[in-house]
Image: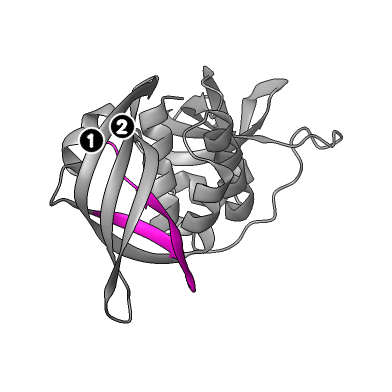
């Protein structure tokens, strides 16, 4: 899975856990049986795009891209959930699958587990540190005006490392200066120029460290 897609998913999670790229309205919670029934396998999460929703096998054919970058075709059984009848080609949704039996898919139902899976992947790929992610998940969300920006020359795939000087707004009033080194998508470097406003997170009572979020363009 591309870094840009991962960062986009992270921002969807920051905005609302339920907005993780799923277009199908889930009107009720589902209790999903373990994949393959008799095996105690921890499923892997992927992003699926419906290819077709008809066929003799009474299943929905889905193009899947896993969090590790694998791409394959899987199937959702229509009989597993009546909500699958609402799926149409082009709909994007989160799916789970057994890595050893990838063709058999189920709808991702545990949003907390999905978020944890993406968190581990973002840290593993070096796009965020544990400290930055902790601030984004549990800190105060605010905004900061960029007052200075310098590229360090370090890059990771399609991301560039920058040092930012910010003036961060306190939600209750006032502001404070901050300095942050972070990776941003190369396509978004123009969004961190002096004068730009970006999302910033910090711990209430501790303004010495901030984390910023800059989505890909």
Residue 201, percent from left and from top: 41, 60
Q: Is residue 107 left or right of residue 31?
A: left
Q: Is residue 206 magenta?
A: yes
Segment tinted magenta in the rendering: 198-216
Q: Is residue 161 above or below residue 86?
A: above
Q: Nearer the viewer, residue 73 or 20?
A: 20
Q: Which residue is mark 2?
A: 185
Q: Is residue 122 magenta?
A: no
Q: Nearer the viewer, residue 194 or 32?
A: 194
Q: Which residue is mark 1?
A: 188
Taking the spot 45% from the left edge, 60% from the top edge, the residue there is 208
Q: Is residue 3 left or right of residue 73?
A: left
| Distance Cα–Cα, label 2 vs label 1 | 5 Å
Residue 4, percent from left and from top: 36, 31
Taking the spot 85% from the left edge, 33% from the top edge, the residue there is 39
Give the quadrant of residue 120. top right
Q: Quadrant of the C terminus?
A: top left
Residue 187 can be seen in this image: yes
Kindly give the residue lying farthest to the bottom in the view shown.
172
| Tag 2–tag 1 contact (CB < 8 Å) | yes
Residue 28, percent from left and from top: 55, 63
Taking the spot 15% from the left edge, 47% from the top edge, the residue there is 194
Q: Is residue 133 left or right of residue 141?
A: right
């Amino acid at each position: 899975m591309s870094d840009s897609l991962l960062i986009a998913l992270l921002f969807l999670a920051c905005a609302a856990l339920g907005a993780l790229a799923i277009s199908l309205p889930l009107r009720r919670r589902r209790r999903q049986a373990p994949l393959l029934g008799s095996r105690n396998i921890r499923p892997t999460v992927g992003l699926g795009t419906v290819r077709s929703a008809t066929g003799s096998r009474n299943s929905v054919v889905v193009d899947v891209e896993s969090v590790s970058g694998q791409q394959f075709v899987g199937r959702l059984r229509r009989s597993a959930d009546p909500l699958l009848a609402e799926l149409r080609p082009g709909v994007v949704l989160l799916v789970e699958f057994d890595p050893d039996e990838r063709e058999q898919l189920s709808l991702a139902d545990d949003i907390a587990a999905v978020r944890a899976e993406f968190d581990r992947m973002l840290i593993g790929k070096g796009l965020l540190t544990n400290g930055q992610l902790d601030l984004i998940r549990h800190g105060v969300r605010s905004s900061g005006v960029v007052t200075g920006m310098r590229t360090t020359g370090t890059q990771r795939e399609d991301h560039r490392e920058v040092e930012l000087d910010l003036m961060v707004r306190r939600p209750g009033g006032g502001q404070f200066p901050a300095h942050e080194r972070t990776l941003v998508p190369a396509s978004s470097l123009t969004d961190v120029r002096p004068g730009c406003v970006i999302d910033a997170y910090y711990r209430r009572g501790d303004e010495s460290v901030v984390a910023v979020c800059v989505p890909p363009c």
